[in-house]
Image (cartoon, rainbow, N blue to C red):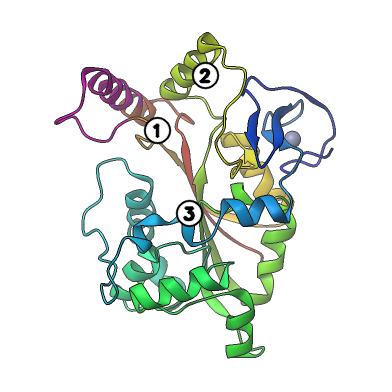
């Protein structure tokens, strides 16, 4: 097996218990070179079908027939979606042009925000039925890859291409990223947000030791995340893919810790306080955090 982040071949076992899904056991290994972790075996097409699609987004199915999805005006403090919008404004990505393609756009919250800033936006979701449901519920231009390419023939060039928490779901992330170059012109900026599930920060330290002390034999969540990076390996991945850095920022979200204190049981109140301490510590400890924001181009 090759490391999907750095390309090297040496691995050692990682502490994550295997997850049992679709009658298979998915284990985790750590790369001896870049210290990323990855899943093995990689999920196949059948596993992917079972993991994704409309069923994975129950908030849409819960809407009534003519009801539209309402986007949050304000996100909880230290929320990964809130961070994505914050960085979009902070780094003034409007300066790179006004057309945006959002890959794996999910609810369309990022497109909705970019639209309010004057962007023309298109979104891709990989399951055509899910894309159709999103179109209906959001009135945003969200399509499957095939639909979008048919709609535009070969004039698909965007000023900004965004991937928000998408790459870690790919079984071939370099190939996937390079495949998006066909939607880019020479000056296109790639904005990529995602988790750093193997990075150092206080909250991850507690999660790791909590898990080790529980000594669970296995889990049963869908193996949606394929790769688990740290601040160095994530940057190395972009370099190896040929991207040149414009911005790279590590920060910390509260998830998986609770985001609010009120009306929570005592255990969650403690976790909330722990999460807040960790978030604030990451503000002063360089490289500490559990999410990244990257912008770069292939020039
Ligand atoms: Zn590696």
- Residue behind mark 2: 208
User: Which element type, helix, strand or loop, lies under badge 2?
Assistant: helix
Q: CA distance from mark 3 to mark 2?
A: 26 Å
Which of the labelled discs sits on residue 32, or is there none? none
**Mark nearer the N terminus (1 vs 3):** 3
Which residue is drawn at the image coordinates 57% and 12% (left, top)?
215
Q: Please identify the quadrant where the N terminus is shown.
A: top right
The residue that appears at 36% across and 52% down in the rendered structure is: 81
Marks 1,3: beta carbons within 8 A: no
Q: Residues within 10 Å of mark 3 (few under 14, many from 20)?
A: few
The quarter of the displayed image where residue 187 is located: bottom right
Q: Estimate the x, y position of residue 65 in percent, counting from the top left.
A: 29, 74
For the residues bearing labels 3 and 2, Cβ distance under 8 angstroms: no
Q: Earlier in the sequence, mark 1 or mark 2?
A: 2
Residue 42 appears in which quarter of the rendering?
Answer: top right
Q: Circle 3 — which element?
A: helix
Q: Mark 3 — residue? A: 56
Q: Is residue 160 above or below residue 238?
A: below
Q: Is residue 285 above or below residue 88?
A: above
Label 1: few (<14), some or many (≥20) within 10 Å? few
For marks 1 and 2, give the CA distance.
12 Å
**Would residue 97 be visible to someone looking at this image?**
no
Q: Residue at x 36, y 27 (%)?
A: 284
Residue that sits furthest to the left in the current view: 262
């Amino acid at each position: 097996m090759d490391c999907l982040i750095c390309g090297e071949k040496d691995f050692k076992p990682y502490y994550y218990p295997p997850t049992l899904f679709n009658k298979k056991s998915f284990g985790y290994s750590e790369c001896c070179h870049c210290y990323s972790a990855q899943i093995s075996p990689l999920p196949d097409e059948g596993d992917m079908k079972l993991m994704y699609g409309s069923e994975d987004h129950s908030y849409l199915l819960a809407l009534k027939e003519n009801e539209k999805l309402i986007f949050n005006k304000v996100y909880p403090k230290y929320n990964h979606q809130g961070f994505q919008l914050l960085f979009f404004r902070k780094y003034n990505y409007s300066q790179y042009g006004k057309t945006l393609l959002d890959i794996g756009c999910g609810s369309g919250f990022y497109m909705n925000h970019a639209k309010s800033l004057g962007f023309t936006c298109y979104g891709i979701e990989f399951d055509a039925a899910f894309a159709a449901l999103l179109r209906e519920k959001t009135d945003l231009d969200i399509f499957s890859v095939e639909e979008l390419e048919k709609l535009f023939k070969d004039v698909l060039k965007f000023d900004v291409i965004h991937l928000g928490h998408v790459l870690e779901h790919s079984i071939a992330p370099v190939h996937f990223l390079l495949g998006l170059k066909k939607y880019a012109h020479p000056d296109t900026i790639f904005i990529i947000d995602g988790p750093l599930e193997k990075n150092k920060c206080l909250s991850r330290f507690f999660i790791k030791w909590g898990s080790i002390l529980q000594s669970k034999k296995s889990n049963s969540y869908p193996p949606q995340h394929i790769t688990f990076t740290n601040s160095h390996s994530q940057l190395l991945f972009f370099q190896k893919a040929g991207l040149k850095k414009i911005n790279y920022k590590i920060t910390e979200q509260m998830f998986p810790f609770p985001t609010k204190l009120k009306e929570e049981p005592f255990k969650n109140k403690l976790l909330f306080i722990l999460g807040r301490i960790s978030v604030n510590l990451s503000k002063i400890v360089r490289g500490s955090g559990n999410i990244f924001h990257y912008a770069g181009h292939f020039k």
